[in-house]
Image (spheres, rainbow, N blue to C red):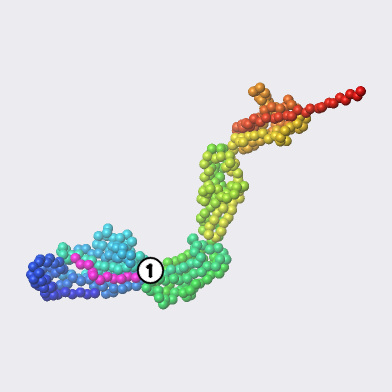
Amino acid sequence: MHVHVSTDDWQRLLKNIRTRAEMWGCIIVTSVLLLSGVGASKWVVYFSRTDICAWAGTTVTLPCRYDYPSPFSSTRVTWFHISAEGRREIAYHTDGNLLSPSYRDRIKYMGGLKRCSLQITNMKLSDAGTYHFRFETDNQQGRWTSPDAITLSVTELQVHIHPPRIGNMFAAGETVFLSCVARGCAAPGRNFALYRNGINLGQSNKLSAIYNFDSQHAGTYTCRPIPPQNVQSPGVTLALGYAPRYTTVQITPREAVREGDSVTLTCSSDGAPPAESFAWFKEGESGSVPDSFRPELRLWSLDYRDHGEYFCVARNPLGTDRSRPILLNVTYSPKNTRILISPKGDIMEGFAVNLTCRSNANPPIEKYAWYKVNGGQPWTKGNAQNLTFSSVRSHHAGQYYCTAWNGFSMGTSPTISLSVLCKFILIVNVHQK
């Protein structure tokens, strides 16, 4: 809009203001953009276009001219942008340090000869909104902000892929749907063409299907309006992927570890896209190892119960793969050393009885020893795992315990009591008279 106010108009306006002030008996202070000594000059910002529709990714020029009275000169200019949400940004400023970060390296001010056009490259959806221009002169009162604005609308063109996948990777044989989707002022009534690696695949206003996806369908897909314009959507690259494979587990350190040590199990696999989640399992246990959804499983201060075979499962959007189990060999001293008696219950003198020494250890138990406590002193009764009495006698009764040795340490069982019931023979003499 071009606004021209003559000096005569300003003088009539001021005279009217003074007359009313005298009538009302008050003082009115006015601030008008008419400086003393200024003739028929004008203060004006002129936009040749006030509504602009642009495609995302293109370059747009906001056309602008401005004027001010001589002999003043322009000292500072500003373009500011107000978004639909009311957010205000500095799109251009004579002092480049005041420029909003979103516009850095994307704007060019086309000044000179009272021109004030602004060029914006690589248009974004966030650039939509209204743009105002303001200039300041070397006179303190010589400042002007355009009452009108340029409304900029942005149309976004995209390639949509279904089903969505991380990395846009699809397995061989899958069905993939593509479509060109435009949103914004330039979209209504438009037709679009789909391209792969720059080759036109034909009109694509609706879904285009790729059946039995394979390597020949891989490439970068873009959309362009019909008829052709200097407009193209961002490229979307489809690739041939596959589920994880060759999944393996490595243990660090590799050698056997002892109780109290720490160890790391690492799950590796080959997948496209790479595996995005992992799960760890221990053979013989239900459910996954708690808090084990990373490629590394860190076990701190190992316990004898950590000994066993472990495997991992690697997963990406195209499937899963399981590793072979690997043994985590935790060496530990004998645990839960105990004595088992067979048969159970009361043992009659003359019957057979067997005492077995049991212990959990890694490496396995190498040597056993049996002891009987007599009068508070132990007496060695054998060094095999089993202590057997083929015909138990009353003098075998007493308290027993065993020890188990595995080369690292020794475990000792609790003491048990062996009770033997005496066998009585009743002899009856019959005397006849």
Q: Foreground: 346 or 153? A: 346
Please, what secondary structure does the residue beneath circle 1 have? loop
Q: In the rendered view, does 251 fall on the left or right side of 26? A: right
Quadrant position of residue 88: bottom left
Image coords of residue 235 (percent x, y): 44, 66
Residue 189 image point, x, y percent: 41, 77
Span highlighted in magenta in the image: 143-155
Q: Count up the numbered dots.
A: 1
Q: Amino acid at mark 1?
A: Ala
Residue 326 at x, y percent in the picture: 60, 46
Q: Which residue is mark 1?
A: 56
The one nearer the camera, 344 or 172, is 344
Q: Main secondary structure of the magenta part?
A: strand
- In the image, 346: left or right of 21? right
**Which residue shows up at 48% across the image and 64% down it?**
237
Q: Position of residue 282 (x, y in %)?
A: 59, 47
Q: Quadrant of residue 385?
A: top right
Quadrant housing the N terminus: bottom left
